[in-house]
Image (spheres, rainbow, N blue to C red):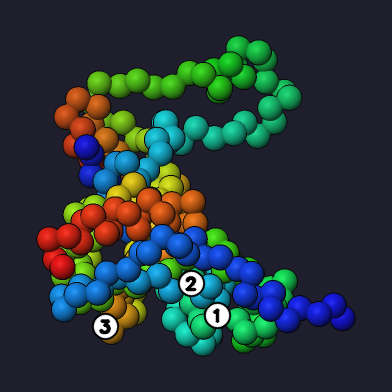
Amino acid sequence: MLRIPCPHCGERDETEFHYGGEAGVDYPADPSALADDAWAAYLFLRANPRGWFRERWFHGSGCRLWFALERHTVTDEIRSA
Amino acid sequence: MADVTGVLDLRRSPLADTAFGVTSPGLSLDELPFRSLVEVRSPEPPTAPGLVWRLGPAWWLVDDSPTTEPALEVPLADEVRAANPGCPVVDVSAQRTTIVVTGEHATRLLAHGCAIDLTVLPVGEAVQGDLAGAQVVIGRTADELRIYVRPAFARHLAAWLTDAALPYT
Ligand SMILES: [Zn+2]
């Protein structure tokens, strides 16, 4: 069980959260202008680092807000993003 | 206007007919049914009667006595709306029922199913989180803990609380 520091509620059990994947993937400004491969890249391609990864979490059982943090994908160490 | 006398008597609280309740020197549990509950969105604490809990950033829950008149919306909602112009106010009375926990073992009891340290929860503040698998709001008043739980989880939580309370009664 990870303990996840919510910026609004403090440290809570992982089971109170939902995982949201890589942080910082913005919706394209003009999606209709994208070629198919660029759209597919936006939808499906994500970094998969061995090491620090900036990712989104949703505190569903608490403040019901999204936030970002950095997690080490090998050690599961967590630090604020 | 239609005759609404007796309409309030037709309500059944989520824990009605479950014989839920614990009374002992160190611990008591009870359902407090039909509270007037109103959610407010406002950066600042809203002006409101009764208890005002902070649920999250700009998110508040107001808890006041049950309504005495049948109405589509609890009168508390309009009262809070008038006192806080520009802030969205929604009647959520039927969304949760209230369980009151009192006694010296109150925080210890909840600790069996809740990873949040309630011993450091100050009077007048609330937390949202999971208690025995159910999403709840837990608020601390001067002499009690109030658990707000959704009706669909109320019977499960009541059964769990009754079981967990055994060593303390
Ligand atoms: Zn939170």
Q: In 3D space, how far apart are the residues under numbered discs 1 and 2 (Cα atoms)? A: 8 Å
Residue in view at x 44 percent, y 81 percent:
B51
Q: Which residue is mark 1?
A: B66
Residue in view at x 62 percent, y 31 percent:
A28
Contact? badges 3 and 2 (CB < 8 Å): no
Report whether B45 appears left or right of A10.
Answer: right
Disc ID at residue B33: 2
The local secondary structure at tag 1 comes to loop
Q: Which one is earlier in the sequence, the residue at label 3 or at label 2?
A: 2
Front label number (3 vs 2): 2
Q: Nearer the viewer, residue B140 or B93?
A: B93
Disc ID at residue B143: 3
Amino acid type at circle 2 is: Pro
Contact? badges 1 and 2 (CB < 8 Å): yes
* In the image, residue A65 above or below residue A33: below
Q: In 3D space, how far apart are the residues under numbered discs 3 and 2 (Cα atoms)? A: 19 Å
x then y, percent, for residue B102: 25, 76
The local secondary structure at tag 2 comes to loop
x then y, percent, for residue B54: 42, 71
Q: Quadrant of the C terminus of chain B?
A: bottom left
